[in-house]
Image: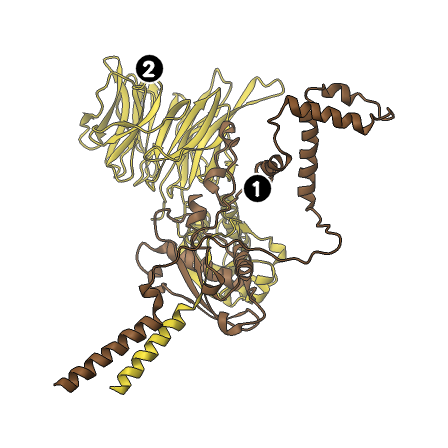
Chain colours: A yellow, B brown
Amino acid sequence: MKKLFYIFILTLFKLNVAHSLIEVDITRGNLDPLPIAISPLHVDAQSENYESIKVKELGDLISSVIEKNFLSTGLFNPLNKNAFVQKPDIAHLKPRFEDWRLITAQALVTGKLLVKDDKLKVEFRLWDLAASQEMAALAFTTTPSNWRRVAHIISDKIYERLTGETGYFDTRIIYVSETGLKTERVKRLAIMDQDGANTKYLTLGNELVLTPRFNPTNQLVTYMSYFRNLPRVYLLDIETGIQEVVGNFPGMTFAPRFSPDGKKIIMSFAKDGNSDIYTMDIESRLVERITEDSSIDTSPSFSPDGKYICFNSDRSGLQQIYTMKSDGTNAKRISFGSGIYGTPVWSPRGDLIAFTKMRAGKFYIGVMRSDGTGERLLTENYYQEAPSWSPNGRILVFYRETKSGKDGLGFTAKLWSIDITGYNERELNTETDASDPSWSSLLSK
Amino acid sequence: MTKSLIYSLSFHAIMILLTVLSLPFMIRQPVDLPPIISVELIQISDKTNIPYAPKARKVIEKVKKEEKRVVSEQAPPAAKAKEKPDRIPLPKKQDEKKELVKKKQNPKEVKPEIRQASEFEKKDIVDTNQIAALIDKAKEESAKVKKIDDKLTQSSVKNSFATGLTLSEEDALRAQIFGCWTVPLGLPYDDDLLVRVKLELKQDGSISKSEILDHERMNRPGQKFYKVLAESALRAVRMCQPLRVPQTGYDKWKIIQLNFNPMEMLKG
């Protein structure tokens, strides 16, 4: 009995002690890019040369691709390699954490590669320098000519480990390459890696091509082309190069977009003088009418769960953004700001809708939540449009036309990217002028 | 039977008494204390001459200039500007008279103190933590500069009796960790983002042991972001050490819990 009593008293005492634990709330931090050291990959001495690839330089090349990827995010600050104090091979085995901390690095990437029997084996490690421990380690084997993709895959893995988000480096962007004078523009379909490398042209430029769009599940692309002055929609498989005609759609101004499962396409075209929204099953080619309104409904885009559609309509008088259920019911206006809204695209994360806004002679690329709240204009210029989301829903790519030449009579069109914070705006390197970009899903899922 | 009943009753009475004495907070309504305003006591010397920060001085001078401009609106400023430097200044009395007349004409003139405060708000204070407000680059909307939210949040109103640290000690520690904590971007806005880190500290403020209190959540599926967030919190305290802790009262702060929550920042 006595014991029980003492235990009870002791418990009460402990409760009081626990109550007095000091707690401090940390509700703010800094948003500076994370300092990261990307050590050149160590090339194994047993490596053999492969075709035109200089294997000895491959370690530097891969690390510089990773470095450029991280720099382009605006979230990381890759440190100058001249400040590195440890050799790549030793750092890869066991870094001297205190040395790396001295150069203010918080994370370190090390790796090594071996080219043997026409195969490239790359392994990398990511180190947390504050905790002095390994955060991730992976190895890949591929053909040596794929070294750029390996660099992108490594970048994705590190990005995912450090941000908690899926990466977007091992992706491609399809766009319309433009050459020649404005009145005699030659437009060709082109595709490149997201960093601007490996550009390939998919059409010859005999016909006008417009608005290519990637299937979110595979490497299939739709685009619109004019055949005998009639808009025609094509399906193109990037991997095989096979293309087929989906159909002739008079009164169509934008190519269709795919549904999230990639089985349907959604589009708008004019029938009986009025533009409405339709879906088409890719396999059965069955067309279903979604909207039936006297107003002009265009540029539809599915939500990532496929349950909703956002689109443009002038049913309120001015062109605004609307959402509705995927069966066409419950349409409601979500944009209420001043100006005209166009090209709404639902984010792959589902939280935001990107759009182009025209107001007072200027064009803005912006985002708003799917219920229309929290509208934010990310970038402003005289002419820019056609935003397309990166697969992780963090970056938007769009095109911008600017005047060029001494007298300002010429013009140039370039691809730009901006992240959803609006801070990190960058021009993408393209061989020619470019417009109508569309971002692919991750190649390595 | 009676004996055991008496024993039982007396034991229960003791229990109730002990509970009432040791857990008073359970029966009393929590007092709704007003937020504490920290006051720093300074010694006043014969001549008080607290220097302005260089930036503040510039702003004050600018405000003063603008005040003059406002006053001289009725007497055209252009004419004043053309005054030659060597021109004989008007006697002071005349100046005073002029000002008196102007005050009568414009009795609702803004007081200098108020104007000065608004200048600070407009130019010097930009809350970098309100990301959502900062990223809208539309010129029309950018004119609306958000006022800094100086209100103490519920979480930050923890008095010294509860924490064992004085407000200024707590603020110093908080400010130190603010600087070290690189908040990972891409966190979901609608999830619970609280990371509780328990630290055992040495007397010099360095960390002898650190522990994430909800560590099992880090490995749950769909909680990758939480792992990243928890790691960033740990990284912050490690980068920051030795922590800015008081020189005395080690027993009070040798075990400390830091509650990292970036929600306010992300929502803006």
For the point 48% across and 15% down, the residue is A183
Task: Tell me the quarter of the image containing the N terminus of chain B.
Answer: bottom left
Q: Quadrant of residue B216?
A: bottom left
For the point 34% across and 69% down, the residue is B23
Are the residues flagged by discs 1 and 2 from a single subunit?
Answer: no
Q: CA distance from mark 1 to mark 2?
A: 61 Å
Q: Which mark is residue A254?
A: none
Task: Tell me the quarter of the image containing the C terminus of chain B.
Answer: top left
Instruction: Work out whether A120 lies above or below A229.
Output: below
* Left or right: residue A167 compared with residue B93: left
Q: Name the residue beneath numbered marker 2.
A: A228
Q: Nearer the viewer, mark 1 or mark 2?
A: 1
Disc 1: CA contacts within 10 A as few (<14), some (14-19) or many (>=20): few
Q: Secondary structure at mark 2?
A: loop
* Left or right: residue A120 compared with residue A275: right
Residue A382 coordinates in the image, percent (x, y): 51, 23
Chain letter for mark 1? B
Q: Name the residue beneath numbered marker 1.
A: B125
Q: Secondary structure at mark 1?
A: loop
Q: Quadrant of residue B42?
A: bottom right
